[in-house]
Amino acid sequence: MAINSSNSSWGLLPSEIKTLILKREWNNEPRLKARLLNRTPFPIRIGLKPPSGRSAIADMAHFQAFITEWRWYPVQKQIHWESRHYRAISEQNVPTFFELENLKELIEFVGKEAHQRSEKWMANMAPMLLISEALYPTLVKHLKTVEQMHLSDAELLSRLIPQLSFQMGVGQYLRALPLVGVDTKFLETYQALISDILDALHNDAITENGGLLEWLGCLKNPKGWLTVRPLCKEAKASLAGFPVMQLHSDVLREHALPATHILVVENMQSGLGLPFMKDTIAVFGGGKNVSWMDANWLKSKQVAYWGDIDSWGLNILSDVRAKLNTVKAIMMDSETIKQHEDRMVLEPKPLENLPQCLTESEAQLFLDLKNRHYTNTRLEQERLSPDYIHNKLNAWLFLS
């Protein structure tokens, strides 16, 4: 397929051809995807605009550069030469077309950046292609997402897909899916890609059911104030049978919740993902809003707090302990980091000053994060694997 250019009136040079190919092929995402899927087949053929005799005589310096630069071009098979007779300068062998026959030649022509980019996306596609080579078009459709992934995320994706099945989440929130070795925030982060992969594997069943949540049978997330969720039948019955409710913090301060164990969780999604737990009610989604935790009734309960492991998460924990010094912090320690260190990210604006109401080990964790002791500075609670979470919560129940 020929590509014409108006950048020069005649005699396109190798540097101009590279600019054209970068713009129209390599950096043009729809065109690149079409090439990868052979919907726009190779070759790429670009006319070099050899001059007429009058034009060549009018600018002999450019004519000589045009001939010389293409003569010294290292891959001569990509250039089509033609003998032309010029009245004033006799017969000349001039380049007429530049042609790239396949993707390999395109990558080699673009150079180092193209090699690195293509190697990255092929490495990240490989774990999914082991499931089915038919996923290749879907992965190309999401090319930018695929190539921006870490390889560990690509491998995690390949472990997640086989675990997902029709209506497996009936009556549960997305974050409560019983996944093994894969955190449910990961599922939410790559939801669009995962939906299309499952469509490819299940004959468009996800789209036909109205989306991933509907296909899995999951409940939609509630929105509002602090969320209260009983985690056992007895606590649910004591709350008039409501599976989840939302209350103001001042209501929580004045009215005791009917369970021995109160689990306070920083983020909404992690709270929705909690498993069933004996004699336990969870309060979550408040973030920094822990003002209600000075309630007198909490002093007679077994209370645990679970938040992100970063400077602000530890600061919230400090605020909680200032109001209730008997609170137990869970999954906010170095052990949890070591189990999930490859999932850490950079905390955007970390807190500078050490919070005042941390234990000695928590204060050391704060300093370790600040001093870049670990791979990164933030481990979101949503990145913990459900099996790890369940084990730690069961241990807390057993010991309290």
Image (spheres, rainbow, N blue to C red):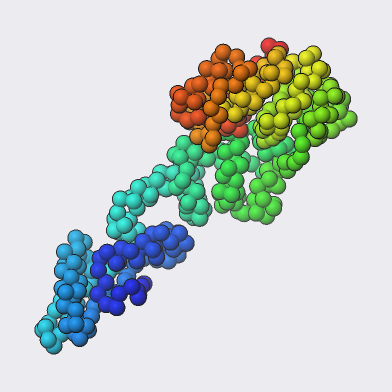
How many numbered discs sit on the rendered protein? Answer: 0
Residue at image x 60%, y 21%? 355
Residue at image x 25%, y 65%? 14
Q: Position of residue 372 (x, y in %)?
A: 45, 26
Q: Position of residue 162 (x, y in %)?
A: 57, 39
Quarter of the image for residue 13 reads bottom left
Specify the quadrant that holds the N terminus. bottom left
Specify the quadrant that holds the C terminus. top right
Q: Position of residue 65 (x, y in %)?
A: 18, 70
In this view, which residue lies farthest toward the top?
399
Q: Is residue 195 above or below residue 53?
A: above
Residue at image x 76%, y 33%? 226
Q: Considering depth in this image, is 390 or 70 the residue closer to the camera? A: 70
Is residue 202 visible in the rendered structure shown here?
yes
Q: Is residue 28 above or below residue 382?
A: below
Task: Judge left or right: residue 10 versus residue 155.
Answer: left
Task: Judge left or right: residue 26 versus residue 161.
Answer: left
Q: Is residue 305 above or below residue 150?
A: above
Residue at image x 11%, y 83%? 89
